Amino acid sequence: MIHLTRELALAHGKDCIRANAIAPGHIHTPLLDGLIPAEMRDARRKAGPIGIEGDAWDIAHAALFLASDEARFITGTCIRFNRTREAHHFSVKTTVRMPMNASATMEGMPINRPDAVDLDTLSIVPRREFEICNDLLDDHAALEAFYQENGYLFFRGVLDPQSVKEARNSMLAVAADEFGLVEKGDPQARWSGKAYPPQSEEKPCFSGISKKLVENPRNQDLLTKILGERPSMVPIVQYRLYPPNGPVTMVHQDGFYSPGIQDYKPLWIPLVPCPREVGGLMIAIGQNKSGYFHNVGKEAPFPIPADAIDPDSWATMDYEPGDLLVVHPCTPHGGTPNTSDRLRVTFDTRVQSARAPSTFEAVVEAVTPNRVTLNSPDANVGTVTLAVDPQTFLRTRGPGVRETFEEFAQVTEPGMRLVVVREGDRAAMLRMGSRP
Ligand SMILES: O=C(O)CCC(=O)C(=O)O
Ligand SMILES: [Fe+2]
């Protein structure tokens, strides 16, 4: 509505027609009398910063003003009423849970702006390109400095070509056999017209594709240079087979969604040519130094406000198979739309120190209300007992289902395969294993 209002104002200003909008929020009207309980009415009243109940007269006076000659110079605006939340007129949520312990890694305060307009990923037009970092590979200090300063590293044609081809073939085989997205054996990956079902990115049919590529000896050498030590794969991978005109990944910061840990490097890997029309990843260069932009004043997944990120910082590239984009956990990034007739075939994975991995797969051995004993196949981890506390991010039953600390001991059973993030002696996250 706000965009429509602005467009109308721009289009018809020359005809002396003004266009303004009113966003009422929580307003009590005779229609609601008896429909909503008194407690809800009270909560709605308290939810606003002024703490009084708005009624239809408040809206009418605003409309009268906007329509009057006194408002002759006002067009393309929106009057918002005493609100703390968008579009949740009947939901009275009294608490907004901070995801995990994000505040611990944040500079300053989290963004808490219940009335902010959300950033629309599709409205972003990246105007910059990346710098190519290949010549920094042999100077780890320079590489790390570039990464911290700019929030990314981009390398051209560095991954072992055979490993990339194999990963592409494996993903295209899944695309054909599991999802019917392409003809079997079509290296062009021309799209069949079928949709990629939501939440398919971690399906077991993909398992092992990332591991094979990451463990290729030439890629291991490359990743050792990038990490400054031997790498191991974080067992969380998203495989993406994105058809034309499908949904794009909304702008987010990976670190916001993973508890505490910052000692991993997210990798984004194109397996087919991804020129602009096929789409790929765009990132906000240098915006990794301002903490998290996610708005905790909104519902999960806490969309970033439209005005939070410098619009001139957005960059993307025409990607080729063999390229590698390393994104900082605090760098805002999102997908760009696929407007071609081909599939966008990419995956994103993460690497961490092999010596002291903070994220690992493990099988639950024993559970108490505030402890979990885990057995990891990774010899660097072995068997560990970790504390579980109310800040532990618990999602042991699958995507989208979060458990409370109180439920933990009931829903977590010996034998469960989990992905664990450890922070010293405590579990920062326990998440259902995904066969990466
Ligand atoms: O490929 C995409 O659309 C999103 C990738 C992403 O979020 C990541 O690599 O962390
Ligand atoms: Fe991401």
Image: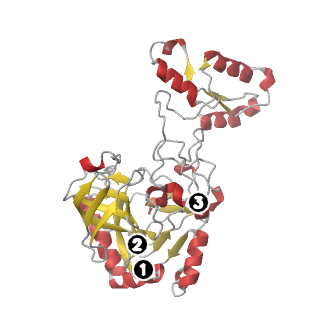
Q: For this view, does 372 lie left or right of residue 221?
A: left
Q: Residue at x 59, y 76 (%)?
A: 146
Q: What residue sits 40% from the left and 67% below the top? A: 424
User: Which residue in the protein does label 2 denote?
Assistant: 351
Earlier along the polypeptide chain: callout 3 or callout 2? 3
**Residues at circles 2 and 1 in contact by the CB criterion of under 8 Å:** yes
**Seen in the image, is 295 located left or right of residue 426?**
right
**Distance from the alpha carbon under mark 3 to that under mark 2:** 27 Å
207 to 405, vertically: above or below:
below
**Residue depth check, mark 3 versus mark 2: number of the one nearer the observer:** 2
Q: Which image quarter is the N terminus in?
A: top right
Q: Which residue is mark 3?
A: 126
x then y, percent, for residue 290: 61, 60
Q: Is residue 45 depicted above or below 201 in this figure?
A: above
Please state, as top left, top right, bottom left or bottom right, where the C terminus lies in the image.
bottom left
Q: Give 245 or 254, whichever is nearer the viewer.
A: 254
Q: Residue at x 25, y 56 (%)?
A: 367
Pointer 1 local density, CA inside 10 Å: few below 14, some 14–19, many at least 20: many
Q: Amino acid at mark 3?
A: Pro
**Three-letter amino acid code of the residue under disc 1:** Leu
